[in-house]
Image (cartoon, grey):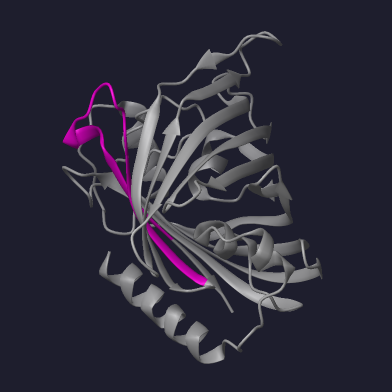
Amino acid sequence: MKTLFIMLAMLCSVSVFAQTEDKSDKADEVITNRMLRAASGSLSRWSGSVNANYSGGSVQKPFAAQRPNITSGADALTLQYMSANAGIRYRINDLNSITAATGIFWNTPFNRSIKTHDKELKKEFNRTKGDITVNDPNLIYTNLASIWGFQVQTQFSPTLITNAQQTNQGYRASWDIQTTWMREISKSDLSLGVSFEWTGYAFSKRNRDLATNVWQVYPIAEYVINDWLNLRTVFGWQVYQQTRRDDTWTFEKRKVYQSLGTGISVTRDIFLYPNIQFIPSDIRSDRTNIGLSAYINL
């Protein structure tokens, strides 16, 4: 964890030093939500970006090698990992852009052993422990819009899967479409919204338990505390997965989950998001996962 915070601090310092003063344009008029702004990129015609993540164990054992699969997701990454993707972004116009990104994926950075009775998980750990691989090269097309008073961000992302955990399972590539709608409640610091997402997969192995499609609908609520701090919760209300063993119209509903985090706006182009994920109907410290995301635009 210390290594991750040092890396993020260095990236933030470089970003602040390199950042030029951009005048607000149509993108900032359409999107005022802090996380959506940071995820959309800077206001420059050409820019760089870094998206860093730490996905740890549970609150009970934050540095453990195992990351509990609390939703029973077929495509879930069930081992602790760190990743950082660097991207080059081109703004087609004020409301449309495309980003090409790739980076590194570090599997179980803080562990050389695992305590588990799950034989498959232990086998996976022994096969990938400490591996540093290229992390999922992808293209991201982003569109921003204002519709019926909602701030709308839509992204389409084809991805070549190269991270150690999913390639060992048999995942080869994915296609993801996500649209997020957020609306500020008049005369308050509260924003409400919803995100719709579909992910499809291609494979290199015949494992019948691999996910082919995942559909998600999750409401979002945010509350602004001050100029640099806000609270954010996501409710994984309707999430359905289809595996290779399922019929065409057969989907399994995943467990309802919730995430709760604190958004930290260092600048317009730097957003940090420490968070936890848990099952609302079964809140337990050993099944509440921790995570940290960072959006840094240069």
Residue 245, image x and y in percent? 61, 13
Residue 20 sits above or below residue 52 on the image: below
Residue located at (56% from left, 22% from top): 241
Residue 257 sits above or below residue 209 on the image: below
Residue 236 sits above or below residue 270 on the image: above
Residue 86, image x and y in percent? 59, 69
Residue 154, image x and y in percent? 70, 47
Q: Is residue 110 visible?
A: yes
The total number of labels drawn is 0
Does the magenta run of residues contain 281? yes
Q: Nearer the viewer, residue 89 or 182?
A: 182
Task: Indicate the quadrant containing the C terminus: top left, top right, bottom left or bottom right.
Answer: bottom right
Q: Left or right of 21: which side holds 64? A: left
Residue at the far front: name it: 187
Residue located at (62% from left, 34% from top): 196
Q: Which residues are magenta?
A: 270-293
Residue 26, image x and y in percent? 73, 68
Q: Nearer the viewer, residue 218 or 48?
A: 218
Q: Specify the quadrant of the image occupied by residue 282.
A: top left
Q: Nearer the viewer, residue 5 or 149?
A: 149
Residue located at (58% from left, 23% from top): 207
Q: Is residue 107 visible?
A: no
Residue 116 sits above or below residue 89 on the image: above
Does the magenta run of residues contain 26? no
Task: Indicate the quadrant containing the N terminus: top left, top right, bottom left or bottom right.
Answer: bottom left
Q: Left or right of 145: which side holds 243? A: left
Q: Left or right of 93: which side holds 13? A: left
